[in-house]
Amino acid sequence: ETGVTQSPTHLIKTRGQQVTLRCSSQSGHNTVSWYQQALGQGPQFIFQYYREEENGRGNFPPRFSGLQFPNYSSELNVNALELDDSALYLCASSLATSTYGYTFGSGTRLTVV
Amino acid sequence: QKEVEQDPGPLSVPEGAIVSLNCTYSNSAFQYFMWYRQYSRKGPELLMYTYSSGNKEDGRFTAQVDKSSKYISLFIRDSQPSDSATYLCAMISNFGNEKLTFGTGTRLTIIP
Protein backbone atom coordinates (compact mmCIF):
# COMPACT_ATOMS: atom_id res chain seq x y z
CA GLU A 1 0.00 0.00 0.00
CA THR A 2 1.34 3.38 -0.94
CA GLY A 3 0.59 6.85 0.37
CA VAL A 4 -0.47 8.20 3.73
CA THR A 5 -4.09 7.77 4.73
CA GLN A 6 -5.87 9.68 7.48
CA SER A 7 -9.21 9.18 9.15
CA PRO A 8 -11.71 10.60 9.57
CA THR A 9 -11.68 13.22 6.81
CA HIS A 10 -13.98 15.59 8.70
CA LEU A 11 -14.98 15.86 12.32
CA ILE A 12 -17.09 18.22 14.39
CA LYS A 13 -16.58 18.31 18.15
CA THR A 14 -17.80 20.42 21.02
CA ARG A 15 -15.49 22.57 23.12
CA GLY A 16 -14.12 20.55 26.05
CA GLN A 17 -14.42 17.19 24.31
CA GLN A 18 -11.59 14.86 23.37
CA VAL A 19 -10.69 13.69 19.86
CA THR A 20 -8.51 10.99 18.32
CA LEU A 21 -7.23 11.29 14.77
CA ARG A 22 -5.61 8.39 12.95
CA CYS A 23 -2.88 8.01 10.36
CA SER A 24 -1.57 5.09 8.37
CA SER A 25 1.97 5.76 7.19
CA GLN A 26 3.36 5.06 3.77
CA SER A 27 4.73 1.53 3.54
CA GLY A 28 8.29 1.32 4.83
CA HIS A 29 8.25 4.73 6.51
CA ASN A 30 9.25 4.56 10.18
CA THR A 31 8.87 8.21 11.14
CA VAL A 32 5.58 10.07 11.46
CA SER A 33 4.98 13.74 12.11
CA TRP A 34 1.80 15.64 12.84
CA TYR A 35 1.11 19.19 11.75
CA GLN A 36 -1.72 21.63 12.41
CA GLN A 37 -2.76 23.92 9.57
CA ALA A 38 -5.09 26.75 10.47
CA LEU A 39 -7.06 28.39 7.67
CA GLY A 40 -4.82 30.56 5.52
CA GLN A 41 -1.67 29.49 7.33
CA GLY A 42 1.18 27.10 6.72
CA PRO A 43 1.35 23.83 8.65
CA GLN A 44 2.76 24.08 12.16
CA PHE A 45 4.74 21.19 13.64
CA ILE A 46 3.06 19.42 16.56
CA PHE A 47 5.35 16.44 17.16
CA GLN A 48 7.24 13.58 15.54
CA TYR A 49 7.45 9.89 16.42
CA TYR A 50 10.21 7.47 15.53
CA ARG A 51 10.12 3.82 16.57
CA GLU A 52 7.15 4.50 18.86
CA GLU A 53 8.95 7.24 20.82
CA GLU A 54 8.33 10.98 20.66
CA ASN A 55 11.27 12.44 18.79
CA GLY A 56 10.65 16.18 18.80
CA ARG A 57 7.80 18.47 19.75
CA GLY A 58 6.64 21.86 18.63
CA ASN A 59 5.07 24.63 20.66
CA PHE A 60 1.85 22.82 21.54
CA PRO A 61 0.46 22.18 25.05
CA PRO A 62 0.49 18.72 26.68
CA ARG A 63 -3.18 18.20 25.86
CA PHE A 64 -1.88 17.33 22.40
CA SER A 65 -0.48 13.82 22.63
CA GLY A 66 0.33 11.02 20.27
CA LEU A 67 1.11 7.37 19.77
CA GLN A 68 2.96 5.41 17.14
CA PHE A 69 2.31 1.70 16.82
CA PRO A 70 4.67 -1.13 15.74
CA ASN A 71 3.11 -1.12 12.28
CA TYR A 72 4.02 2.60 12.10
CA SER A 73 0.43 3.77 12.17
CA SER A 74 -0.15 6.70 14.46
CA GLU A 75 -2.73 8.59 16.50
CA LEU A 76 -3.05 12.21 17.52
CA ASN A 77 -5.12 12.84 20.64
CA VAL A 78 -6.34 16.24 21.71
CA ASN A 79 -8.00 16.71 25.10
CA ALA A 80 -10.13 19.59 26.35
CA LEU A 81 -10.77 20.92 22.86
CA GLU A 82 -10.76 24.68 22.36
CA LEU A 83 -12.29 26.68 19.54
CA ASP A 84 -8.79 27.57 18.28
CA ASP A 85 -8.07 23.87 17.74
CA SER A 86 -10.26 24.05 14.64
CA ALA A 87 -7.85 23.32 11.80
CA LEU A 88 -6.67 20.79 9.23
CA TYR A 89 -4.51 18.17 10.94
CA LEU A 90 -1.91 16.64 8.69
CA CYS A 91 0.07 13.48 9.14
CA ALA A 92 3.38 13.10 7.31
CA SER A 93 5.52 10.01 7.10
CA SER A 94 9.15 9.63 6.14
CA LEU A 95 12.04 7.25 6.32
CA ALA A 96 14.39 8.39 9.08
CA THR A 97 17.46 7.75 6.97
CA SER A 98 16.08 9.52 3.92
CA THR A 99 16.74 13.10 2.99
CA TYR A 100 14.06 13.15 0.36
CA GLY A 101 11.26 14.56 2.42
CA TYR A 102 7.87 13.87 3.83
CA THR A 103 4.74 12.37 2.32
CA PHE A 104 1.59 14.04 3.60
CA GLY A 105 -1.87 12.65 3.96
CA SER A 106 -4.95 14.60 2.92
CA GLY A 107 -5.63 15.57 6.50
CA THR A 108 -8.51 15.57 8.95
CA ARG A 109 -10.51 18.77 9.12
CA LEU A 110 -11.53 19.33 12.73
CA THR A 111 -14.17 21.87 13.64
CA VAL A 112 -14.69 22.72 17.30
CA VAL A 113 -17.98 24.43 18.12
CA GLN B 1 9.55 37.69 13.24
CA LYS B 2 8.67 34.39 11.59
CA GLU B 3 11.49 32.04 10.59
CA VAL B 4 10.05 31.79 7.08
CA GLU B 5 8.24 34.63 5.33
CA GLN B 6 6.07 34.11 2.27
CA ASP B 7 3.75 36.53 0.53
CA PRO B 8 0.27 35.03 0.97
CA GLY B 9 -1.07 36.59 -2.22
CA PRO B 10 -3.52 35.89 -3.69
CA LEU B 11 -1.76 35.92 -7.04
CA SER B 12 -3.71 35.76 -10.31
CA VAL B 13 -1.99 35.45 -13.68
CA PRO B 14 -3.17 34.61 -17.22
CA GLU B 15 -2.59 31.16 -18.63
CA GLY B 16 0.85 30.83 -20.23
CA ALA B 17 2.51 33.43 -18.01
CA ILE B 18 5.66 32.84 -15.98
CA VAL B 19 4.94 32.72 -12.26
CA SER B 20 7.49 33.62 -9.61
CA LEU B 21 6.93 32.59 -5.99
CA ASN B 22 9.36 33.52 -3.24
CA CYS B 23 10.25 32.94 0.39
CA THR B 24 12.79 34.46 2.70
CA TYR B 25 14.09 32.87 5.87
CA SER B 26 16.17 33.81 8.88
CA ASN B 27 17.61 30.50 10.13
CA SER B 28 21.01 29.94 8.51
CA ALA B 29 20.95 26.27 9.61
CA PHE B 30 18.37 25.38 6.97
CA GLN B 31 19.95 23.16 4.31
CA TYR B 32 17.03 21.46 2.55
CA PHE B 33 14.43 23.52 0.74
CA MET B 34 11.15 22.29 -0.60
CA TRP B 35 8.14 23.54 -2.45
CA TYR B 36 4.81 21.88 -1.80
CA ARG B 37 1.63 22.31 -3.81
CA GLN B 38 -1.65 22.09 -1.94
CA TYR B 39 -4.98 21.85 -3.67
CA SER B 40 -8.12 22.82 -1.83
CA ARG B 41 -9.07 20.32 0.89
CA LYS B 42 -5.98 18.21 0.22
CA GLY B 43 -2.64 17.66 1.94
CA PRO B 44 0.58 19.22 0.64
CA GLU B 45 2.25 17.41 -2.27
CA LEU B 46 6.02 17.66 -2.70
CA LEU B 47 6.79 19.52 -5.91
CA MET B 48 10.46 20.42 -5.78
CA TYR B 49 13.33 19.63 -3.44
CA THR B 50 16.73 21.31 -3.34
CA TYR B 51 19.75 20.81 -1.15
CA SER B 52 21.84 23.89 -0.34
CA SER B 53 22.27 26.67 -2.90
CA GLY B 54 21.68 26.35 -6.61
CA ASN B 55 19.01 25.71 -9.21
CA LYS B 56 16.94 22.66 -9.97
CA GLU B 57 14.68 22.21 -12.94
CA ASP B 58 11.85 19.73 -13.43
CA GLY B 59 9.75 20.24 -16.52
CA ARG B 60 8.00 23.60 -16.25
CA PHE B 61 9.21 24.14 -12.69
CA THR B 62 12.51 25.65 -11.55
CA ALA B 63 13.56 26.02 -7.93
CA GLN B 64 16.32 28.42 -6.92
CA VAL B 65 18.07 28.72 -3.59
CA ASP B 66 20.38 31.57 -2.60
CA LYS B 67 21.65 30.77 0.88
CA SER B 68 23.77 33.92 1.03
CA SER B 69 20.60 36.02 0.74
CA LYS B 70 18.39 33.50 2.56
CA TYR B 71 16.01 33.60 -0.37
CA ILE B 72 14.33 30.83 -2.34
CA SER B 73 12.17 30.98 -5.44
CA LEU B 74 9.93 28.75 -7.51
CA PHE B 75 9.32 29.60 -11.16
CA ILE B 76 6.50 28.09 -13.17
CA ARG B 77 6.75 28.45 -16.95
CA ASP B 78 3.83 28.19 -19.34
CA SER B 79 1.41 28.23 -16.42
CA GLN B 80 -1.74 26.13 -16.75
CA PRO B 81 -5.14 26.38 -15.01
CA SER B 82 -4.27 23.07 -13.29
CA ASP B 83 -1.42 24.91 -11.55
CA SER B 84 -4.02 26.85 -9.54
CA ALA B 85 -3.31 25.91 -5.93
CA THR B 86 -1.60 27.12 -2.79
CA TYR B 87 2.19 26.86 -2.93
CA LEU B 88 4.04 26.36 0.33
CA CYS B 89 7.76 26.74 0.80
CA ALA B 90 9.28 24.56 3.51
CA MET B 91 12.74 24.08 4.88
CA ILE B 92 14.65 21.95 7.35
CA SER B 93 18.18 21.76 8.72
CA ASN B 94 18.38 17.98 8.62
CA PHE B 95 15.93 15.08 8.42
CA GLY B 96 17.03 13.23 11.52
CA ASN B 97 14.70 14.67 14.10
CA GLU B 98 13.96 18.14 12.86
CA LYS B 99 10.65 19.68 11.87
CA LEU B 100 9.69 21.17 8.55
CA THR B 101 9.21 24.91 8.85
CA PHE B 102 6.66 26.22 6.39
CA GLY B 103 5.80 29.59 4.96
CA THR B 104 2.19 30.73 5.08
CA GLY B 105 1.61 29.69 1.46
CA THR B 106 0.81 31.71 -1.66
CA ARG B 107 -2.57 31.16 -3.25
CA LEU B 108 -2.15 31.10 -7.04
CA THR B 109 -4.90 31.26 -9.65
CA ILE B 110 -4.18 30.77 -13.36
CA ILE B 111 -6.84 32.46 -15.46
CA PRO B 112 -7.72 30.63 -18.71
Image: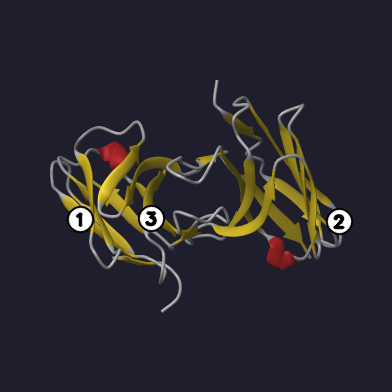
Q: Nearer the viewer, mark 2 or mark 3?
A: 3
Mark 1 lies on a secondary structure that is strand
* CB within 8 Å, label 2 to label 3: no
Q: Which chain does the numbered disc 1 sit on? A: A
- Which residue is rendered at x = 30% and y = 63% of the image? A72
- Image spot of residue A67 (x, y percent): 22, 53
Q: Amino acid at mark 3?
A: Thr
- A47 to the left or right of B3: left
The reply to whether label 2 and label 3 mark residues of one chain is no
Quadrant placement of the N terminus of chain B: top right
* Residue type highlighted by circle 2: Ala
Q: Nearer the viewer, residue B76 or A87?
A: B76
Task: Determine whether, in the image, residue B111 is placed left or right of residue A21.
Answer: right
> Are discs 3 and 1 both within one chain?
yes
Q: Residue B99's x, y, as percent? A: 46, 41
Label 2 residue SS? loop
The residue identified by callout 1 is A20
